[in-house]
Amino acid sequence: MINLFNAQIETLSLHKIGNKSRNESMVLSDSPYKLNDEITPLLKEFFLKPFREKEENYFQFAHEVDLEYNTLFSLINDCFHYKGNPEALHLVSKRITEHLFEQSNHPHIKNGEVYVVYFTNVSIDNIITDAVGIFKSEIKKDFIQIQENGSHLEMLLEQGILLEKIDKGALIFNHKKEDGYKVLTIDSNRYDARYWLEHFLSVDAFHDENFNTKKYLKFCQDFAREVVLPAEDKKEEVMFMNKAVNHFAKNDQFEESNFFNEVIDNPDLIAEFKNFKVDKGAKYSIEDLSTFPISNSAVSDARRKIKSVINLDTNVQIRINITNPEVAEKVIEKGYDEEKGMYYYLVYFHKETK
């Protein structure tokens, strides 16, 4: 979990880059940008708002040979080393911008402003630390500037950056350096996603409890849809996922053997689950995963996304309470009416509630 409410901007460097394949130039500022009390809170919101609103999917710097060969990882190391030295940080910001410019070869890549920001007092995993933010604004918007000319008002059409949405951004926390730091990234313009994520940042997914919890629950969801639903029915698919999510919600540590006993409790289905994991576990990066700490936030995210509704072709919906699937299993029965030639659900209850 991150908390950016108390984050402070210590230094900011502003540069501009074009598209290298179109022979566009690069402009590197001579010195750090001089912040003031009026613009600083606006820039802080501009940079950090997307990360507060976005689901926390962490990445880490990576390299196929050795992490030290990752260009940006080494530059971020220098940033954290030069904390409190604005001039030295500014020199590193130039090298970061040059590295981004070298990756700007695809014809779809737009020119834009690059901001390299050093933040203090950010919180991640309940630890107060620093972070380096790298942002790029690409899309310009038209706006009208009103100018007074004596008793006459004139409208001037101008272009500028709206402080509503940053186009690209990465927030690198001074945390888990040995693993390649914890990194959050956003990309509002998906037409050149590889350029930012793979070529510039060179990151892989961070395999922490959040990642493991999300991936295992996604695997369970696909197992329910591809195996449980065809073999049983929609009710059993929904019930399986409800039990799975509730198992994760009430435990701090995941143990696959306990999961089998509490959620599946059927030797044949357990065998199918294990076979499904052998076949498709690598796709979810859980092929060798059988025990790990559980992320409560990831469980909450999964619960919101899972549909606990049985939609019938007669325009009737049956919603199952996902917090207590055992009760739902006892009061809902499925059958087939030979006379009508239709399936039915029989629902037991004591009284209607408001």
Image: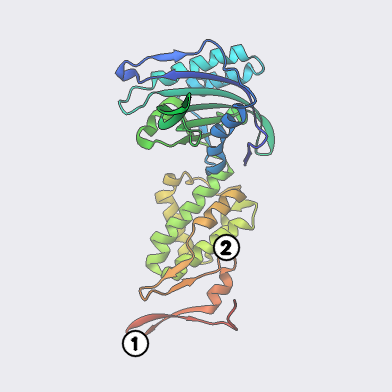
Q: What residue type is labelled 1?
A: Glu
> Which one is in front in this view, the residue at disc 2 or the one at disc 1?
1
The label shown at residue 338 is 1
The residue to which callout 2 is attached is 261
Q: What residue type is labelled 2?
A: Asn
Q: Position of residue 79 (x, y in %)?
A: 59, 19
Q: Quadrant of the N terminus?
A: top right
Estimate how packed mark 1 is, as few (under 14), some (14 to 19) or many (20 or more) residues with alpha carbons within 10 Å: few
Q: Where is residue 291 in the image (x, y as percent from the top left)?
A: 58, 48
For label 2, the SS is helix
In the picture provided, is 111 more to the left or to the right than 249?
Answer: left
Estimate how packed mark 2 is, as few (under 14), some (14 to 19) or many (20 or more) residues with alpha carbons within 10 Å: few
Please tell me in which quadrant of the rendered image residue 160 appears: top left
Res. 315 in view: yes
Label 2 and label 1: CA atoms lie apart by 36 Å
Eyeballing the image, is 129 above or below 81?
A: below
